[in-house]
Amino acid sequence: MISVAAALQAVLNTTQEFGVEQIPFLKSGGRVLKEAIYADRDFPPFHRVSMDGISIDYTAFKKGQRSFRIAGTQAAGSARLVLQDPKNCLEVMTGSVLPDNTNTVIRYEDITIKNGIAIVHVDSLQKGQNIHEKGKDRKVGDLLIAKNTKIAAAEIGVLATVGKSFVNVAKQPKIMIVSTGDELVDVGKIPQEHQIRRSNVFTLVSLLEKLNIASETAHLTDDKPILKSKIKIYLQEYDVLLFSGAVSKGKFDFLPEVFDELGVEKLFHKVAQRPGKPFWFGSTKNRDLVAKQPNNKCTIVFGFPGNPISTFVNCLAYFYPWYYNSVGMKVEQETAILSSAISFKPDLTYFLQVKLSTRFGHLVATPVLGNGSGDLASMIHADAFIQLPQGQTEFEEGAVFPVIRYR
Amino acid sequence: MISVAAALQAVLNTTQEFGVEQIPFLKSGGRVLKEAIYADRDFPPFHRVSMDGISIDYTAFKKGQRSFRIAGTQAAGSARLVLQDPKNCLEVMTGSVLPDNTNTVIRYEDITIKNGIAIVHVDSLQKGQNIHEKGKDRKVGDLLIAKNTKIAAAEIGVLATVGKSFVNVAKQPKIMIVSTGDELVDVGKIPQEHQIRRSNVFTLVSLLEKLNIASETAHLTDDKPILKSKIKIYLQEYDVLLFSGAVSKGKFDFLPEVFDELGVEKLFHKVAQRPGKPFWFGSTKNRDLVAKQPNNKCTIVFGFPGNPISTFVNCLAYFYPWYYNSVGMKVEQETAILSSAISFKPDLTYFLQVKLSTRFGHLVATPVLGNGSGDLASMIHADAFIQLPQGQTEFEEGAVFPVIRYR
């Protein structure tokens, strides 16, 4: 049995890249950018008028002139006009180009227009006011978005601005989620007394959806030859297999043997944690299988224990960091403050369900006590796990620990 | 000009429901549940074995018996067996039904099996150990998920468990996002000197996607008759119209007039905030138009100012709360601690871009200073807006204010 830290390190050591694909920019939300985005022109690309009003030559105003004949209108989206006579002005609109031979914009609030003449009410102006200078925000060639940024609304806007109709993003791993256990029936069925409905695979589908990964699901019966023949195919066709169940000590917990016989190297089995202890993790080393993978990649196998909360927390604590690392995404570790003392005797890392809230800028984690790893319904009232370290039994109110959010 | 609080209240007063639709449970992630979910049976539904091992009648052990003949195996997913002779035992697997006439499970770690006989190594057992009692987590009929819960992975698992293949969720509003401004060209085009590419509508599409709302987009030229005829149709066909631009004082800022002429009642125009001050907000009152809406609903019109950050922050500060309220979702207001002092002289609420991080359980907001409301690229380095209140000019390091996240 290894520690949570050692298990996480072993998982991260199997990080792999899945290549790059080009997709329409508007479909790229939530994906990881695999190219740097540079300014294609200065921003703003021209001296941009930033207030509706009139544009003048400041020298005229400085000399005492206060009324200006309006010689025309510079609309946003029209080519640059020229102020021919420096004693006149041009009406200008927010977003328009600053007309030539003008250098100062006076907003409508500070003028009165009558019979084509604008009369200025203010006694002082700043030369260059209400003009957003060309290149002030960014210069052509400036880095706007770094490679490996997770794309969200702000990035979508910038991609549009620089004309990136298509964008290079990290390809997602191809993932199969497999449930085992003869007690499981489909969601649409009425279970007999000794049966329950399949749920873990759907929880996993939803957790992967949060990462924008579309996954497939399958159910296999607790029959060793069937498991072996199906998993052999999955190892060839998928980058990652996520299993729920059949990794403990039961007579029908065939997965560890099947993985071994199919050449999946066990990297660890059992982690000093609760819930989720019987977690099995490995990677294909079988050269025949590897040869069939594109780019000779290995298939990574996460064998999560079958209890709902065990599967849930292990997906968050191990698969998520593996994925972030594989696509090159940096994710900051959050910490929270325990709202009440917790006592936990076993010499294990304890992933405790908590409800997070911010109080005066403090992130507070309130324990949500369920009935153990089978009590999925208790997860409804929580939104994160707080990670209480091994080798300690008393955790004080106000102490700070890492948290993993799932909402 | 009204305050941010008054503007938000006016927006929330137009909250409306869009009805309920039934969708497959696995497609319901991110949606708002519109029915209460109850336990369809006890959880666990039977006395559930929670360790792999053997199951015995505790009385035999108490009388001193330490070796038990294995009379059979109770697998998970098999109908309940009966222990015929209380001096024997049955092998039992995690997840299986507890066999009749047994009441205590001894895990494999505490026994040795030889020639069909299990020998117990431990001297004390607890009657009922390693059994997850029927109904211990939840009783049939218990409320598992309250109405108006936002569905995420935990809810997906619970919906599967209780057999809700289809689930009632809040219908999403039908939304059209309209850009105006003759300076705008398509993302795929090379702009002339005085032009820029359309970006705000795509930022809005992405912000709505975060709420699982699929929206439509259009671009209208700054031509009053065209604006009027198109918007008349949109008012009939959509629940919400989001505009970007043409709501300020410019000669071609026709939208307020057009809205008025089409019978959209102005609820406010201009809010005491930066950025985003020229925000126009209204709702249809025209009975002819209302009559054409399903359920006689009004169409809500958000006229956001055209600067990228103005549009962005107003979508988060007004449209998001309006949406949450409309679908019945409760969202907690987060607060964060300002990492450095900020001075802001205008008598306006200041929505300042910040980068959030947690340090020892404290949510710290570090200002990201851009070049004003046109500098979209500065949003890449931030992930939230901190809301600094009107009527105050100095904001101290360490002070706590509300934040609105956008990542």
Image (cartoon, coloured by chain):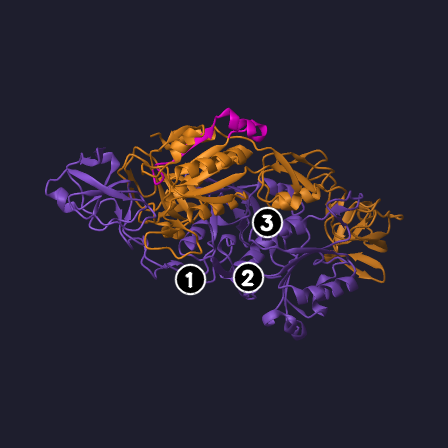
Chain colours: A purple, B orange
Q: CA distance from mark 3 to mark 2?
A: 43 Å
Q: Is residue A63 visible?
A: yes
Quadrant (top left, top right, bottom left, bottom right) of the N terminus of chain B: top left
| Residue at 57% over, 50% down | A351
- The chain to which mark 2 is attached is A
Q: Which residues are magenta?
A: B274-298
Vertical order, A41 against B33 (above or below): below
Sequence-wise, the earlier of marks 1 and 2 is 1
Residue at mark 3 shares a chain with residue at mark 2: yes
**In the image, farthest residue toward the right:** B84
Mark 3 vs mark 2, foreground winner is 2
Residue A233 - label: none
Sequence-wise, the earlier of marks 3 and 2 is 2
Residue A27 x %, y %: 52, 53
In the visual, does A380 lie left or right of B279? right
Badge 3: how crowded within 10 Å, few (<14), some, or many (20+)?
A: few
Q: Amino acid at mark 3?
A: Lys
In this figure, what is the number of numbered marks?
3
Q: Amino acid at mark 2?
A: Lys
Vertical order, B321 against A158 (above or below): above
Given residues A326 and B52, the one toward you in this image is: A326
Q: Amino acid at mark 1?
A: Ala
Given residues B359 and A123, the one toward you in this image is: A123
Residue B80 x %, y %: 83, 46
Residue position marked by numbered label 1 in the rendering: A36
- The chain to which mark 3 is attached is A
Residue position marked by numbered label 2 in the rendering: A171
Given residues B78 and A236, the one toward you in this image is: A236
Residue position marked by numbered label 3 in the rendering: A345
Rendered image quadrant of residue A259: bottom right
In the visual, does A324 lie left or right of B42? left
